[in-house]
Amino acid sequence: MTNSRNIKSFFTALPKNIFAGFVVSLIALPLGIGLALASEVPPIAGIVTAVVGGVLVAVLGGSNVTISGPGNGLVGVVAAAVLLYADQSGLTGNEALYEGYLILLAAVICSGLLMLVLGFLRLGKLSNYFPSSAIQGMLAAIGLIILGKQFHIMMGNRISRNGNLEYLTEIPKTIIKTFYYNDTSLTFAMISGVISLIIMVFYAKIRNKYLQLIPAPMWIVLLAIGFSYYYELVLQLPNPIHPDYMISGIPEAHEIISNIPTPNFNEVGTLGFWAVVLSLTLIASIESLLSIKAVDKLDSEKRRSNVNRDIKAIGFANIIAGFLGGLNVVTVIARSSVNVNNGASNRSSNFFHASFLVAFIVLFSTELTRIPLPALMAILVFTGWKLAHPLKLIDAFKIGKEQGFIFLTTLVVTISIGLIEGIVSGIIATALIHLIINKSVLPFIRNILKPNVLMFKETDTNNYYVSVKNFCTFLNFSKLKRKLDTIPETEVAIIDFSWCDFIDHTVMENMSDYKEIFRKKGGTLEIIGLDLLDAGSKHPFGLRKILPVKKMLESTGVLTNRQELIKTIAKELDYNYMVRRKIETAYLENFIYFKTKTINHTYNEIGKKNTVFKVFDVEFYEGEFIAKEVVRSTMLYTEIDHDLPIFSIHREGLLELLYHYAGFKDIKIEKEPAFSKKFYIKGEDEEAIQQLITPELAQFLLENPSFHIESNGKALLIFTKERLAGVSEIKKMKVFAGELRKIL
């Protein structure tokens, strides 16, 4: 029945997925050609990559609305590899580049095999071991590499330099040079690039639903082809753009099949070859995993992709693409976003995007040679600028100075040396900063294999409770992630970091993502315990470290999300909110619960000046020396305007049954047998307690069995569990206390 429903749903959504695939193909066509040319390989290689990726990942993949094809991040690695092997070939010109391309194809195939192995070993989780700021720095570096190399071609000034930095530093020289072109064909090439860049920058600001059915890159293609025909048919003149800056080498459909290149595996035994393979695998994996994660957030049906299955599909697609003359297949965020925005609901849109690309090549391959190279490079320059926008660095510094340093370290090393070296430097920089912040090597090393994560489902509320202890960083986040991934997003989950000594930016960012996923699926994920940790910045993703005791008592620090919500509750109730820790806790010490416990302090207190009614977090400990156990809980204290017997009431469990056999007295309320069976009651004045438990009170407590209630004769102490409460639980506690006061 379910299968037939799924099939019907698939065909019902087919028109939308065909349309989405068509719109994506309009972007993929010029972008694929541009990425191939920027990578120093034949332009058709970009289209082959998109077609193979679109078909195979659509059939075999584990994601839902992603698009596969050539990726921006691989341009630098591919171009460097092709040029290196071209220089070693002993040939010159296009023949040398083609020889480098054939060796690259072998590297693409080996990279695909490696990704396939990673998928079968279920190592998609490796993406969790890269610090967020290091990844952002690497992506920014890739953006600068793309921008630096393609800017000169966009301006009609093809140059060749040894390093990425030289391309960037010579951008001003290229701009000045354009004012002194003697050859008008170069001027026309430059104009085509500048106009294309203007279209890319301002097109998104034109909010017209009909105009935007055709994406900006396709408008560039259409205008370029129209310009070529205008000169040829109307003015009867040759294309005024310099021939060196026109696309060439796009074969017709029948020639593509008959001229499939043969990969050259002669370099497979060299260390340099495997360095290229590792670079391709690393960048393709990171770009794909980041894109899958990002696109899952956009999915209207809030589905979660099977990452390992997708990595296997991408790996297999790379192998086939390499044998057919294509580049590395990756999951691409920009085209995937367009796919989602145009109504895609399943993987068929990826297949249709590939199908339309095949149709374009079959029908219009000769027309594509009318596109100026600077126009395509303008698309890549714009893409590079978006990846490396200065706001990325500013945002990193807003999260924390140390995150800005990690970002810059990764960026500089990536541009100066290479991609693998860049990401490794980012990881090392992050680890060193963590060591410096914690001021001790041994605890940090000891906690690398932690955190200790405890998860269980609370029987009375059916909420999932996850307690995280010790250190939680990018090096061990996968332990927490495995637990979180088992919780249905439609449920309520409470993540308690109050036992954590250190939480880094990568974990904080991932927790924000999880909160969003739960919210969209109808569930709730609440994070508690962060207010015991000192924030590195005011940014919600800033790393957090345990506060020294003295600072805990003095500092209000940066409010966590939970504290902000508690503050909001206080404002709604016209209560005061006190963040600071208080050590005046004598009013709690005469309750039965605290007779054998030592209270350290209370904090996060809300209450009213004129009435003694307050909710607060409290830290206390049981036992001493090696038996000492620190506990943190959220409790409510309220004074009553008449005398009450001293008592303790809580839900009866296995421990209370053992108490009974051990001789501890449980007061039985004879007139309320159902109540007595469910609750354990302790107190000295049994007669007064018998009178206190009226039918109304018994029924009320039976309807709210999760609360622990105590009386010291003058006031009540109420709490649910020996842990910090979430904001929703605090609200329930307040409502419960209000109703209880009325009944009493």
Image: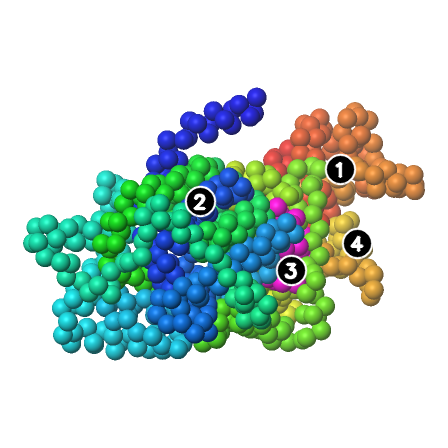
Mark 1 or 3: in front is: 3
Q: Secondary structure at mark 3?
A: loop
The structure residue drawn at horizontal position 66% and vertical position 63%, both measured from the top left corner, is: 471
| Magenta region | 467-485
**Can you identify the residue that label 2 sits on?**
54
Q: Residues under labels 3 and 2: Cα distance?
A: 34 Å
Q: Residues under labels 1 and 2: Cα distance?
A: 58 Å
Q: Position of residue 641 (x, y in %)?
A: 64, 43
Res. 586 in view: no
Mark 1 or 2: in front is: 2
Q: Is residue 280 left or right of residue 229?
A: right
Q: Amino acid at mark 3?
A: Asn
- Crowd around label 3: few <14 · some 14–19 · many ≥20 (10 Å): some
Q: Secondary structure at mark 2?
A: helix
Q: Earlier in the sequence, mark 3 or mark 4?
A: 3
The residue lying toward the viewer, choosing from 96 and 519, is 96
> Does the magenta portion include 473?
yes
User: Residue 531's mark?
Assistant: none
**Can you identify the residue that label 4 sits on?**
595
**Can you identify the residue that label 1 sits on?**
651
**Is label 3 in contact with label 4 (beta carbons under 8 Å)?**
no
The residue lying toward the viewer, choosing from 656 and 235, is 235
**Can you identify the residue that label 3 sits on?**
476
Q: Residues under labels 3 and 4: Cα distance?
A: 39 Å
Q: Secondary structure at mark 1?
A: strand
Res. 292 in view: yes
Q: Position of residue 695 (x, y in %)?
A: 71, 26
> Does the magenta portion include 505?
no
